[in-house]
Image (tube, coloured by chain):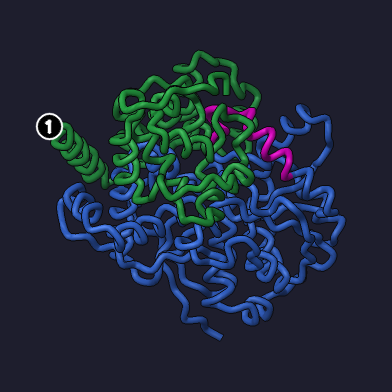
Amino acid sequence: MKNKLSYSYYPGCSLHASAREYDESTRGLFKALRIGLVEVPDWLCCGATPAHNVDELLSLSLCAKNLELASGVEGDLAVACAACFSRLKTTQHTLAANDDKRQQVAYALDGPLAIGKSVKHLLEILAKDLGLEQLSAAVQKPLSGLKVACYYGCLLTRPPDVPQLDCTEAPTIMERVIAAAGAETVTWSHRLECCGANFTLSRPGVVLKLSGDILASAKRAGADCLMVACPLCHGNLDIRQQEIEAASGERYAMPVFYMTQLLALAAGVAPGKLGFDSMITNPVPLLKEKHLL
Amino acid sequence: MKQTKMTLSQTTMNLDFVKRVEHLSGSSVRRCFQCGKCSAGCPMRSFMEHPPNRIVRLLQLGQFERVLAGRSIWYCASCETCTTRCPNKVDLAAIMDALRKLSWDADGPSKESYVQLANRLFIENIRSYGRQYEMRLAAVFNMKSGQFLKDFMLGPKLLTKGKLKMFHRKNRNLPEIEKIFSRIEELRSKDRD
């Protein structure tokens, strides 16, 4: 069966470095699902939080430029990083509603705007475009017995008008997607709380507190692991986990997976191609215990 | 808040500032009726001297110096919880962006220097390279903030995990980026005149 789905792809800066396993597993998963994925050549940083924090016009202009670059590649724009996704959608939303800002951005870009590309997070592509039935049908190794705490963080669902991925305060899209691959999901309190985001650079103490609370909540709920869809959330929960353990005196040893790593594993992609070796909290013992490796 | 007493008069209240914030953010400041939902859900409130609802109240009372002088606006994580939950459609996350921009453009007197330094370096990286290079960002941040040993143990670990990129290819859209930055600067200087 040949799937006709095909997308242009905006990985974002992290997926070329600290989140390389998110990029690798996304490519692996899409290939296994026979969904086309073509990276936008020479894309630029979306500006992320620092740009919109102090200079909205810069943030809007960088995203508008990226949307223009993406218009040169066929297919809706697939975005993996929750922050890039949020910035690109915010730009479309803001510029559709505000003539002044649209004119300023057109001046900054020195030309007419081409920002109409449909922007989709990977979750949306899997749950809606492909559909859960098809996703389920592609599963070769069900994630049976794996208890997953799905962590949304901030920008996949907030603010209500922008991402429009799912319900803002009670989303289920991540749970539905991973359940389609046979995993069990836990009910827990902190799935929509902030991880501390980019304070990881300037004020890491903030991250130790907020991400510590998230890990504690997932552990209380009996989760084996966390599943995320954002490289910054991943960095805070995985890379800083040992530091969080040292600061709080709690022991978590909780693997933090990108959703595409788990889905690709279920879809039969070779584990060696999923970047498990680049995670700081080693997921191999858990995956072996569940007979997934 | 240490100074709870404030004298309100035409000379101590700056309502023009509120109008600028409302214009920049596209959100009403005046519509807030102090229910406190924003602060109840704010993950960063314990790090702020003024929780979000008090920031709005101070703005309504024209006390912008108090708002800009503290570190609160720089401790907002842009998580959008306040905006999502406000019953009066006050877009507090956008108001925070507007406050930071006004403070940033005026080279304001905030106490919070680390967050601002991180922002500055992040934006400079975009202008120079077109993309973010995390290792460079962290190294320069540590150097400029004088915390040479911050995350000292993390660097080698990330390198062996292949999470830090040592080399990068030149982005072909760099001239476009430079043009965007300089045209925005041009717009800003026109704005000031």
Q: Is residue A200 magenta?
A: yes
Residue shown at the point (62%, 41%) measured from the top left: B43
> Callout 1, which amino acid?
Asp
The image shows residue A89, relative to residue A233, as above or below, that is below
Residue shown at the point (62%, 46%) measured from the top left: B41
Q: Is residue A204 magenta?
A: yes
Quadrant housing residue A263: bottom right
Q: Colour of chain A?
A: blue
Secondary structure of the residue carrying numbered label 1: loop
Residue A240 point in image, percent of width and height: 67, 35
Number of marks: 1
Of A146 and A176, which appears nearest the observer?
A176
Residue shown at the point (64%, 53%) measured from the top left: A192
Instruction: Decide if residue B136 is in sight here.
Output: no
Q: Colour of chain B?
A: green
Residue shown at the point (73%, 38%) measured from the top left: A212
- Image quarter in which the N terminus of chain A is found: bottom right
Label 1: chain? B
**Residue under numbered circle 1:** B193
The image shows residue B63, relative to residue A80, as above or below, that is above
Of B181 and A145, which appears nearest the observer?
B181
- The range drawn in magenta is A198-214
Of A105 and A43, which appears nearest the observer?
A105
Q: Residues within 10 Å of mark 1 (few under 14, many from 20)?
A: few
Residue A252 point in image, percent of width and height: 81, 41
User: In this rendering, would A63 be left or right of A148?
Assistant: left
Residue A28 point in image, percent of width and height: 58, 63
Instruction: Decide if residue B17 is in sight here.
Output: yes
Of B162 and B10, which appears nearest the observer?
B10
The rendered magenta stretch, by its main secondary structure, is classed as helix
